[in-house]
Amino acid sequence: MMKQFKIMLPTVAEAKEFVTAASKCAFDVDVHYNRVIIDAKSILGVLSLDLAKILTVELHGDDEKFEEFLAKKAPGKCSAA
């Protein structure tokens, strides 16, 4: 089952934290922005996205801890750039 979350990563530090958390998942995690799909476990890929925009994260598995992390990064809940 695939799950989607909307998140914002307004700072480079938050992007690094996101990639570190995604890397702990035993399944694929993708980040979508417009028509671009990036592997969430790639720091260069994530940093190449426009971090000022809302991103869609797609999980190809279940990880409750990572889902809680993503909930904290929802638009309106994350820190400002």
Image (cartoon, helix red, strand yellow):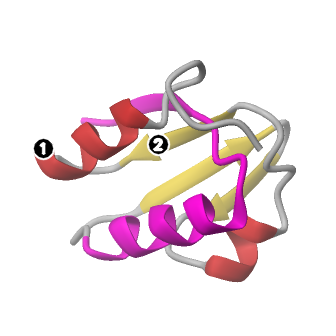
| Depth check, front residue: 56 or 20 | 20
Residue 7: x, y in percent? 56, 34
Viewed as shown, does residue 46 lie left or right of 52? left
Instruction: Provide the secondary structure element on which disc 2 rests.
Output: strand
Name the residue at 52% across, 42% down: 57
Location of residue 78 (image quadrant): top right
> Residue 64 bears which disc, if any?
1
- Which class describes the residues within 10 Å of circle 2: few (<14), some (14-19), or many (20+)? some
Instruction: Provide the secondary structure element on which disc 1 rests.
Output: helix
Name the residue at 35% across, 31% down: 71
Q: Which residues are magenta?
A: 1-24
Residue 15 lies in the magenta-colored region: yes
Q: Which three-letter amino acid code belongs to the residue tagged 2?
A: Glu
Closer to the eye: label 1 or 2: 1
Name the residue at 43% across, 58% down: 29
Q: Is any atom of residue 55 visible in this view?
A: yes
Q: Which three-letter amino acid code belongs to the residue tagged 1?
A: Glu
Residue 22 lies in the magenta-colored region: yes
Viewed as shown, does residue 62 lie left or right of 17? left
Quarter of the image with the C terminus in it: top right
Alpha carbon separation for disc pair 1 and 2: 14 Å
Query: From this viewpoint, which residue is outermost toward the top?
Result: 76
Q: Earlier in the sequence, mark 1 or mark 2?
A: 2
Viewed as shown, does residue 44 lie left or right of 17? right
Q: Is residue 49 above or below residue 13?
A: above
Residue 59: x, y in percent? 37, 46
Q: Is any atom of residue 63 visible in this view?
A: no
Viewed as shown, does residue 48 lie left or right of 16? right
Mark 2 — residue?
Answer: 58
| Depth check, front residue: 4 or 72 | 72
Name the residue at 56% across, 72% down: 16
Residue 56: x, y in percent? 60, 35
